[in-house]
Amino acid sequence: MSFRPIYAELADELICGIQNGTFPVGALLPTEVEIARERQLSRSTVRAALNRLVTLGLVTRQKGVGTRVASSVGHSSYDASTTSIEELVHFGAATDRLILSREEIVSDDRLAARLGFRPGTRWILVKALPSDFLSNDPPICWTDNYIEPRYADALDGLEGYRGLIADRIAERHGVVVDEVVQVIRPTVLSDVVADMLDAVPGSPALDIIRRYSSAGTIVYVSASQHPADRFEYRMSLRRR
């Protein structure tokens, strides 16, 4: 089963446009706003795609000028490595999602220790699966989304929203996510999760926690469980 985040798919399309001459060397690409409006994406998704093009050496970006095509031949490797907050958070973004349930909870000690927030705090818990669970392939993950109750209205119409819940909160409330902490741990699938993912109960999996904060306050946490054979994470570091 193949899965690519939205920003990576957009980056691929822009790369094709550069290589086939739609955007020749020296030309300016459409602005973030123009691309976001045309494709109905968030600006942070577009920014993450453009950052990949910069990393590949295909474009340069200058404030007040825009994004200019610098080369039609980029670096040889292009994968899901992460170099910025935008790329990290969009690495795990699904195109669409199916909402399974929504409820308000109070975190106990065990949940708080796993997710990194205080016991006794209230959260809106949204359980979801990627929308491609309707295809012949099994779902890639199960995700529990924890949203600070003051942002609950960001969940309205969520099933039709193509993007991150963090982006949805930002769009509705003007919250700027300035820090994302990602924790990856080994785990095993419970009977319930394994059944939803068409996997074997007790089989190995990755527990991926992402905490999204604004000015030191956690506004949203995603907790995804991926069967071991349905997820690959690579990080590329370059000396500067």
Image (tube, rainbow, N blue to C red):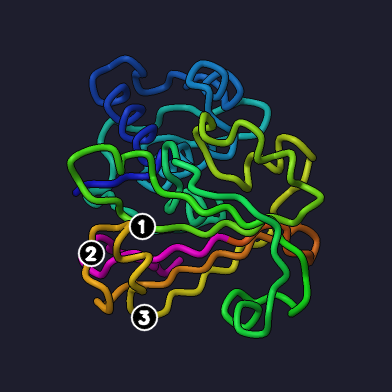
228 and 108: which is toward the camera: 108
Q: Secondary structure at mark 1?
A: loop
Any mark on residue 116, and which?
none
Q: Secondary structure at mark 3?
A: strand
The percent coordinates of residue 166 (x first, y second) are 63, 48
Circle 1 residue: 141
16 and 232: which is toward the camera: 232
What's the magenta region? 222-240
Estimate how packed mark 1 is, as few (under 14), some (14 to 19) or many (20 or more) residues with alpha carbons within 10 Å: many
Any mark on residue 186, and which?
3
Question: Residue at 53% of width from left, 56% of height from top?
Answer: 84
- The amino acid type of the residue labelled 2 equals Ala
Look at discs 2 and 1 and give the one toward the viewer.
Answer: 2
Q: Earlier in the sequence, mark 1 or mark 3?
A: 1
- The reply, left or right, for residue 9 in relation to residue 49 is left
Question: Is residue 223 on the magenta stretch?
Answer: yes
- The reply, left or right, for residue 30 in relation to residue 186 is right
20 and 222: which is toward the camera: 222
The percent coordinates of residue 190 (x first, y second) are 36, 74
- The amino acid type of the residue labelled 3 equals Pro
**Cα separation between marks 1 and 3:** 14 Å
Circle 2 residue: 199
Locate residue 231: give its quadrant: bottom left
The percent coordinates of residue 108 (x first, y second) are 68, 79
Q: Is residue 236 visible?
A: no
- The reply, left or right, for residue 4 in relation to residue 148 is left
**Cα separation between marks 2 and 1:** 10 Å
Question: Residue at 24% of width from left, 58% of height from top?
Answer: 198
Give yes or no for contact between labels 3 and 2 (Cβ–Cβ under 8 Å): no
- The reply, left or right, for residue 143 in relation to residue 123 is left
Question: Is residue 202 on the magenta stretch?
Answer: no
Look at discs 3 and 2 and give the one toward the viewer.
Answer: 2
